[in-house]
Amino acid sequence: MATGIMFLVMFGLMFLGVPIAVAIFLALVVLIGMNPVTTANFLAQTLYSGVASFTMLALPFFMVAGTIMETGGLSKRLVAAAKSMIGGITGSLGMVTIISCMFFGAVSGSAPATVAAIGAIMIPMMVQDGYNKYYATGLTCCAGGLGVIVPPSYPMVLYGVTCNQSVGDLFMAGLGPALVVGGILMAINYVYCKKHGLKGDNKFDLKTMGKSFWDAKWALVMPVIILGGIYGGYFTATEAAVVAAVYGIIVGLFVYKELKFVKLWEIFRDNTAFIAGTMFVMAPAKATGQVFAYLNITKIISDFLFSISTNYYVILFLIFIILFIVGMFVQTTPAIVILAPTLLAVVQQVGVDPIHFGIIMTLALAIAFVTPPVALNLFVGSSMTGISIDKITKAAWPFLIGLIIAFFVVAYCPPIALAILGCG
């Protein structure tokens, strides 16, 4: 009863426009008032411990690194490299957009940032080449979800911290699923472009590709440094994030020379506000997760799900429904911090690997970036193009279906994620 009232208070406050962190905290206070399972002192300690984590430091540094590389001339070089790979096949510019999102996701870790960086270049190019503007925007918004699937990924960092899992393992496990998602989106784009006669006008040229990749080499080597450094034992995931940020500053200032010291200050200032907002949400979300543990919410959810079925595939399908609905209304940070420990305890009972579940949850929340009303990618796409959210959503539905198909392919075939770790 008390838990139900808590959720009503939380969603009611969010509906009224109250900041999500405040809504979660006030709902938590209501819950504790009705069912005092813990003390106010412990609650205050949990609010602090929710963000006082060394691994959590990776999150702001990866965000800063992604913004630095975006501002420093990275995105246009990655687009040029992607374009040189495709040549003149049907739907080439759409495929370039998807591959560029994969490349940029490997240095940004953020879906909205990927949409903004790649969309600013590719949407006008696609429209000029004959693509429908709504389709081009919908494609970019959905492909932008690759920003959190390709490592490094800030949802993976959050999941690793929340569930005490290796962030490095999560990064490595994201490589296979990212290829699956990218492949399915490119297949959908090919079918659409074949139907509408959209062909590329640039023939594949090995020399041009070599030149483009050489020009983008400083950007492309960044993920190698991050993953290689972690698995080579040279630094932790947090230290890798710091290395990435410093590397981005050096490349932007002295190699590409498109990043200025004045702009660097603006990047730090803007990211500080965004990071503070993330931490502000995570603190009460973490406290809510602790209270849920006291209330034995995990057993309640597991009993409910297992009353329906104990089948591995059915349980994962039900988990997808839960995450899909939650993702429509709740931002990524509280969704992971509150739900991940609870749902992980449930799925482990049917044999789901914790790293695999981290990838499953990341994929589900990548879909949430394009499912209104809380759909950050759509808001970014709308602000860039002036197209309303509903029209972008209508144009994006084939790719949304593609993302859902990719989710179940990865969820039902664990080796896609785990084979690279030797445990698939």
Image (cartoon, rainbow, N blue to C red):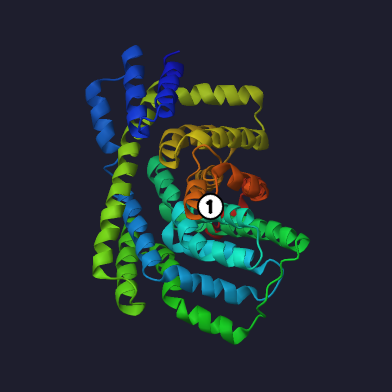
- Residue 228, percent from left and from top: 42, 67
Residue 64 visible, this orientation = yes
Amino acid type, mark 1: Gly
Name the residue rendered at 33%, 54% in the picture: 58
Name the residue rendered at 32%, 53% in the picture: 60
- Residue 45, percent from left and from top: 24, 31
Q: Secondary structure at mark 1?
A: helix
Residue 235 visible, this orientation = no
Q: Is residue 203 left or right of residue 103?
A: right
Rendered position, 277 above or below 95: above
> Quarter of the image holding residue 416?
bottom right
- Nearest to the observer: residue 262 or residue 307: 262
- Nearest to the observer: residue 106 or residue 134: 134
Residue farthest to the bottom, as pictured: 207
Name the residue rendered at 42%, 52% in the picture: 167
Q: Residues within 10 Å of mark 1 (few under 14, many from 20)?
A: many
Q: Is residue 351 left or right of residue 336?
A: right
Rendered position, 223 above or below 400: below
- Residue 94, percent from left and from top: 63, 63
> Quarter of the image holding residue 70?
bottom left
Q: Quadrant of the N terminus?
A: top left
**Total number of numbered labels?**
1
- Residue 21, percent from left and from top: 34, 33
Rendered position, 73 above or below 283: below
Rendered position, 306 above or below 360: above
Q: Is residue 346 left or right of residue 153?
A: right
Residue marked by disc 1: 145
